[in-house]
Image: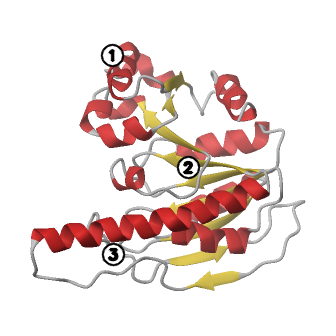
């Protein structure tokens, strides 16, 4: 069990999908436990806090190793975080099509291979990390996924994290940048409701802007709230469905 959030990662597994058309690559599968396990303990709050700090410190150590590994290969890694249904996978499908660099993806979900299959059909190699009861990816899972995925030097790597606006913000994966995707259907109060997520972000993509005429979402209010938490954060409103402003998103990626 994760001492930081209480989620369980027993049975977390990494699965490599078949190659997208035109991208031959060896296929392997790794399965196993990929999380620091902390036994139930009826002890004091101080002891619980010590365990939490130990888990996060171990994760940070492994994340630093991931970061060094990726930097040595000149791979840009983007940790893509959001609540379920924000349109992350649709955004990735469009990004794969538009990117001038090779793209690979680590997909995180509690169960199923649905999103990784969509990425493969879009033309990129992907591995699926199923976390079971776990609500976030961690550095160990990403390290195992990198072993299986073997992204090529100079490529763009996306980590599509488990849908959650809380715990993914706490766990460094070794990424180059953190990006939060929020849909206009979720409401414009999310930055203040989930401050850790937006305070950690390098960029916030406001997706599904094609629905703005039909929902109560004030982009200016949301942007102002996010800026109070993170003055350096950039807000990019887009529609992954229609393609509106995706060139701005692509330019940001190209500049990394």
Q: Which numbered dot is residue 235?
A: none
| Residue 226 x %, y % | 37, 26
183 above or below 63?
Answer: above
Q: Residues within 10 Å of mark 2 (few under 14, many from 20)?
A: many
What's the image's color scheme? Answer: secondary structure
Mark 1 neighbour class, 10 Å CA radius: few under 14, some 14 to 19, many 20 or more: few
Question: On screen, 89 above or below 35?
Answer: above
Q: Position of residue 208 (x, y in %)?
A: 50, 29
Give the SS element for disc 3. loop
Depth check: give the residue in front, 140 or 96.
140
Task: Name the N-terminal-most of marks 3 and 2.
Answer: 3
Asked if residue 241 can be seen in this view, the reply is: yes
31 horizontally vs 185: left or right: right
Pick the quarter of the image with the C terminus.
top right
Q: Residue at (27%, 63%) from the top-left corner?
A: 5
User: CA–CA distance between discs 2 and 1?
Assistant: 25 Å
Query: Quadrant where the N terminus lies?
Result: bottom left
Of marks 2 and 1, the one in the foreground: 2
Q: Which mark is residue 79?
A: 2
50 sits left or right of 130 in the view: left
Circle 3 sits on which residue? 8
Q: Which residue is mark 1?
A: 221
Give the residue displayed 57% in from the left and 28% down from the top. Answer: 239
Q: Secondary structure at mark 2?
A: strand
Q: Is residue 142 above or below residue 119?
A: below
Marks 3 and 2, how far apart in space? 21 Å
Q: Quadrant of residue 88?
A: top right
Q: Quadrant of residue 133?
A: bottom left
Q: Nearer the viewer, residue 27 or 46?
A: 46
The structure residue drawn at horizontal position 42% and vertical position 22%, both measured from the top left corner, is 231
- Specify which label sits upstream in the sequence, 2 or 1: 2
């Amino acid at each position: 069990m994760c001492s930081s959030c209480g989620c369980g990662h027993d049975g977390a597994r990494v699965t490599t999908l078949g190659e997208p058309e035109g991208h031959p690559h060896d296929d392997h599968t790794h399965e196993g436990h990929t999380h620091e396990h902390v036994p139930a303990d009826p002890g004091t709050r101080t002891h619980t806090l010590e365990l939490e700090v130990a888990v996060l410190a171990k994760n940070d150590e492994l994340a630093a190793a991931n970061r060094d590994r990726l930097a040595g290969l000149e791979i840009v890694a983007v940790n893509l975080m959001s609540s379920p249904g924000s349109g992350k996978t649709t955004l990735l499908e469009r990004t794969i099509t538009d990117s001038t660099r090779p793209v690979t993806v680590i997909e995180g979900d509690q169960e199923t291979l649905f999103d990784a299959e969509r990425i493969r059909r879009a033309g990129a190699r992907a591995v699926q990390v199923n976390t079971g009861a776990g609500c976030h990816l961690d550095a160990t899972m990403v390290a195992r996924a990198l072993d299986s995925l073997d992204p090529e030097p100079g490529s763009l790597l996306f980590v599509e994290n488990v849908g959650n606006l809380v715990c993914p913000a706490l766990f460094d994966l070794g990424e180059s940048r953190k990006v939060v995707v929020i849909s206009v259907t979720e409401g414009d109060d999310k930055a203040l409701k989930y401050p850790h997520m937006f305070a950690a972000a390098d960029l916030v993509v406001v997706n599904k802007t094609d629905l703005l005429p039909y929902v109560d979402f004030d982009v200016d209010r949301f942007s102002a709230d996010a800026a109070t938490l993170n003055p350096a954060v950039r807000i990019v409103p887009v529609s992954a469905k229609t393609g509106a402003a995706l060139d701005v998103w692509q330019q940001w990626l190209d500049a990394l």
